[in-house]
Image: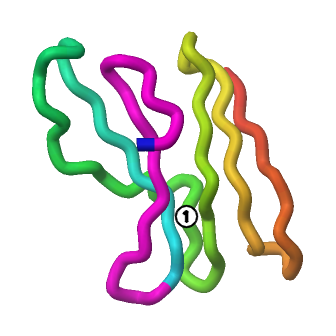
Amino acid sequence: LNGVIGVAGVLARTPLNGQEDIYMSTRNSVTDPWPAATALTDFNTATSNEEDAWMSIDMKTFVFASNAGGTKDLYISTR
């Protein structure tokens, strides 16, 4: 997993539609196994690649790359 923070992790993978999308998985403790990852639908698009996901340790900053605008750009989400 990219951006693994002990109990949370983000990754990019290619689903059946052929586009790379971002997924996240969380677990209750660092000793628990990783459950199946779920797609981050707020960030994924149907026609572009979203990849290279990274999340800060405090889980307040999320960065990923996407070619949704025609060129590969970085996108930053904060809370």
Question: Disc 1 residue type?
Answer: Asn
Q: Bounds of the magenta span?
A: 2-18
Give the residue at x 52% y 33%.
3
- The image shows residue 43, relative to residue 29, as above or below, that is below
Within the image, what quadrant is residue 33 found in?
top left
The x, y position of residue 25, in whole percent, is 30, 39
Position of 50 with respect to 17 (left or right) is right
Within the image, what quadrant is residue 7 found in?
top left
Which residue lies under the disc numbered 1? 44
In terms of secondary structure, where does tag 1 sit? loop
* Prevailing secondary structure class for the magenta stretch in the rendered image: loop
Give the residue at x 36% y 77%.
15
Residue 40 among magenta residues:
no
The x, y position of residue 40, in whole percent, is 45, 52
The x, y position of residue 34, in whole percent, is 19, 36
- The image shows residue 35, relative to residue 26, as above or below, that is below
- The image shows residue 58, relative to residue 50, as above or below, that is above
The x, y position of residue 79, in whole percent, is 66, 21
Disc 1: CA contacts within 10 A as few (<14), some (14-19) or many (>=20):
some
Give the residue at x 61% y 85%.
47
Give the residue at x 21% y 25%.
27
